[in-house]
Image: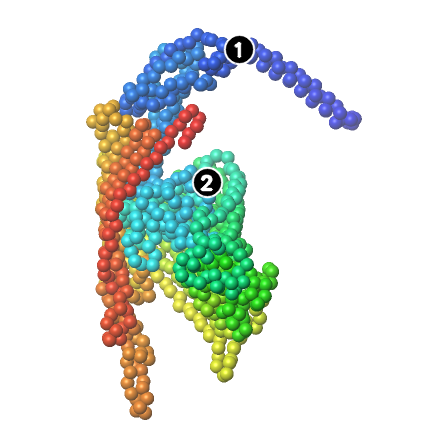
Amino acid sequence: MEKKLTKPIPLLRQGIQKHLLTAKLVLLTFALSIFESNAYCLVADDLNPESDITLQQIKVTGVVKDADGQPMPGVAVKVEGTTLGALTDINGRYALEVPGANAVLVFSFVGYAELTMPVSGRTVIDVTMEETTAALDEVVVVGYGTVRKSDVTGAVASVRADAIKNVATTDAAAALQGKAPGVQVLTNSGAPGQAATIRVRGYSSNSGNIGPLLIVDGLKVDNIQYLDPSMIESIEILKDAASAAIYGAQAGNGVVLITTKTGTKGLATISYDAKYTVQSLARKPQIFGAEDWINYKRMSGVDIDAALESNNYDGTDTDWFDVVFAPSWSPQHTLTFQGGNNVGHFFTSINYVNNDGMVRGDRDVYKRLTAQINADYNIKEWLQIGTNNSIENWNTKSVSQMSQYGSVMNSVVTLDPLTPVYYASPDQFASSMKQAYDAGRPILKDPTNDMYYATSKYITDDSGNPLLQRDRVDRQNGGINLRGVIYGNLKPLKGLVITSRFGYRVGQNTVHSYNTPYFATPQASTYDYSISADANTNYYYQWENFANYNLVLNKHNVTAMAGMSYTENNVDNVSASATGPNILSGYQANFRYLNYVISNVVDGTEKTIKTFSNAPSQATQISYFGRLIYTFANKYSVQGNFRADAFDSSKLSEKTRWGYFPSFSAGWIVSNEDFFAGIAERIPVTYLKLRGSWGLNGNINVLNNYMYNTTISYNSSWYQYMVDDGAPDYGSAPSGLANPDLRWETSEQLDFGIDLRFLNDRLSVSAGYYDKKTRDLLVTINPVPEIGVASTVVNAGSVQNRGFEFDAGWKDRIGDFTY
C-alpha cells in the first residue's frame, strides 16, 4: 500500500540546508589549504617595486626576433601580474629582473601575436614572434572580389568599421569626412535629411552628377544616406583609374565600395544602442546689432536719424539668428541581432532616426526607419547562398532655401535688427506693407499668437521676415525603398569560385507642396496659391555572373577574374500642379491637395493654371570585364583590368555605344628583398612598397533622352509663311542639331605612390601623386540663331586634375591600453 508523505516542503528544505552547510565547510577547508600551500606564490604575484617584501631576484636576458630571424626593437617585455617590464633595444635585446624562478614573461608588439613564456629558472630566454593573420593577409574589397592588402597596386583607401562606429552622423557619406586622403565630403545645406556629397580627387566634369559610383554589397545604388554607419563593415574608395577601371564607363569620378556587416561565429547576441546628438550652429556670423547698423547707415550718407524719428523707433535690437535657430536633439536607436556558426551567419539591424532641425518649430524634420537583413548559408562545402537586404522608410519636411527672395537663411542675414519679430496691428506696418494690406493683399500671421510677421521699415530690397518664409511653405517628401542582392557561390574546384548575383532596387516616393500667397516686400511676394504633387516610382535590377580563380605554385600567385553584367533601370514619374488665386475649395490642411482644386474664372478668363507631366523611361547596359593579378615571392605584383560597356540607344548612337576601358598597375614590396635587412638595421623602416598605375575610365551621367539626335518642332516661330487668306502660318523645323558622333567623357589617369611603416608598424605613411586628364567633355552649345536651332550637345574641352596625397597614422599599445 502506498504511503502518503506529510509536509514534503519543510522536509525538503531541511535536507537542502543540511547539504549546503556541509558544502560550505568543505569549501572553506579547501580554500584554507590552498592559501597555506601557495602563500608564497600569492605574495610574488602581488609584488611591486614599492613593496617592503623582497624575494630572490633573477636577471633574465634574451633576444626577440621575427619569423625571418630579424631582431625586433621596441617589443614590450612584462612580468605577468606585476608592473615590472622593459623594451627591447635596436638589436632586439632585453634585460629584466624578475621576482623568482616561477615568474612568467609576456612579450607583446603591435601587429604580432602576444607570446607568454614561463621563466622556469632560466636566465636566457630568446623568442620568435609571429605576425598576426590580420597584419599578413588583411583583405581589401575591390570590384567583383577581394585581394590581400599587400597585393594592392592601385590607389585604394580603406576605412574600417572601428573608424566610423562612433561618429555623430546618420549619413554614411558624412562619416567619411577626414577618413581618406583625396576624398572630400561636402554638404550644400544643413537641413535635416540633406545627404552629403562625395568628391574623389576634385572636379573633373561639368555634368550634373559628378560624384563617384556607389556600390553596396555589389549593388549599384543612387545614394548611401540610408546606411547607418553602425551597419558598415568596411568602405573602400577606388581613386585611381587602375583600381576603378573594372567599372568602366561609370567610374570616371571614382568608386566607393561599401560592405555591410555579417554575423560573427559564436553565441548569438542582441545589442541595443542609443545615441542622442545635440545640434546647433557651428558658427554664428558677426552681423550688425542695432547700434552698429545705425552707425553704418550714417557713415553711408543715409539720413537714418530722420527715418528713425518718423517710424517712432523704440530701441528694438533683434538678433535674427536667435529668433530662427535653436539647439535641437536628434535621437537615434539601433537594435541588432547577429550570430553564426560553421554553416552560416545572420545579421539584422533596425535603426530609427528622428532629426528635428535647428530651425524653430516643426517645419524641418527628417525621420528614417531602416532595417538591414544579411544572411549566408553553406548548403554544401561547394555551394554557398546568401542575401543582403535593406528596407527604408523615410519622411522629410523642409523650409525654403537657396533662393534670392524666399530663403529663410537669406532673410536672417539681410533683415535689419531694428525690425521686431511681430506687429500687433496694421497701424505698425511699414508703408509698403500697409499699402498692400489696404489693397487686400494677404499679410500672414503667426498661428501660435495671432500676430503679424513684421517687415522692415528701413530697407525694401530684402526677403522679409524669416519666420514668414518658414511658414508660407508646407512641403513634405517621403517614401519607401527596398534594396538588396541574392547570390550563390559555387566552388567546384580548389581556388575557383563562380558567383551569380542578382541585385535589385525598388523605390516609391511622393512630394506634396503647398505655398500660400503672401506679401513681405515688393520683391518677396506673390498673389497666387501654388500646389503641386509628384509620385515617383522606379525599379532597377542587375544580373551579374563572374568567376574568381586563385592559383598558388611555390612563390607564384595568380588571381584571375572574368564576368559579365546586365542592368536595367525603369523610372515612371507623374507630376501635377496648379497655381492661381483662390484655387482650392478649402484651405485647411486636409484640403491642400489637387483633388480640391477648383476653376477660378475672372471676367470670363480661367485664372487657374494646371499642368501635368509624365514620361516613363528605361535604360539598359551590358558589360564584360576581367582582371589578372600576378605576384611573385610576395615582392612583385602586376595587375591588368579590362572592361567593355555598351548602352541602349537612349544614351548613344549605335556606332559609338561601345566603350573600352583598360588599366595596368604594378607594385614592388622593397622591404621583402634580402638586401633590405641591412637597411632596416640602420633606419626603423619595417615596410616599404612602391606602386604605379595607368588606366582609362568614362562618365555617362549627363547622357540621356537621345541627346545625339534631334526632333521636329511644329509651329516653329523661325519658319513662317503666308497662306491663301493672307494670314501668317508656321511650319516645322528641327529642335536642334543632330550629333551622331557624340560619345562619353573619358578620363586618363597616371598614379604613383609609396607606402611605408616605421617603428615596427607603429607609424604608417602613404604618399602619392596623380595626374588625371578628362577629355571629350559633354557641353551644350548654342549655334548661330539665324539657322533656327536652339542648342546641341557636343564633345568639347578637357579638364586636368593633378596633385599630391599624404596620409599618416600611428597606433601603439601600452600594456592593456591600445590607441
> According to the image, label 2 marks what residue?
166
Label 1 to label 2, Cα distance in Å? Answer: 46 Å
Question: 168 or 34: nearer the eye?
Answer: 168
**Quarter of the rendering containing residue 25:** top right
Measured as percent of width and height from the top left, residue 507 is found at 45, 58
Earlier-in-chain disc, 1 versus 2 = 1
- Of badges 1 and 2, nearer the viewer stands 2
Image quadrant containing the N terminus: top right
Q: Is residue 478 left or right of residue 9?
A: left
Q: Amino acid at mark 1?
A: Ala
**Quarter of the rendering containing residue 459:** bottom left
Measured as percent of width and height from the top left, residue 496 is found at 32, 41
Residue 22 position (above or below residue 135)? above
Q: Is residue 789 left or right of residue 309?
A: left
Image quadrant containing the C terminus: top left
The residue depicted at 27 percent of the width and 29 percent of the height is 685
Residue 2 position (above or below residue 220)? above
Can you tell which mark lies on residue 39? 1
Question: 666 or 494: nearer the eye?
Answer: 666
The residue depicted at 34 percent of the width and 53 percent of the height is 211
Q: Is residue 122 left or right of residue 367?
A: left
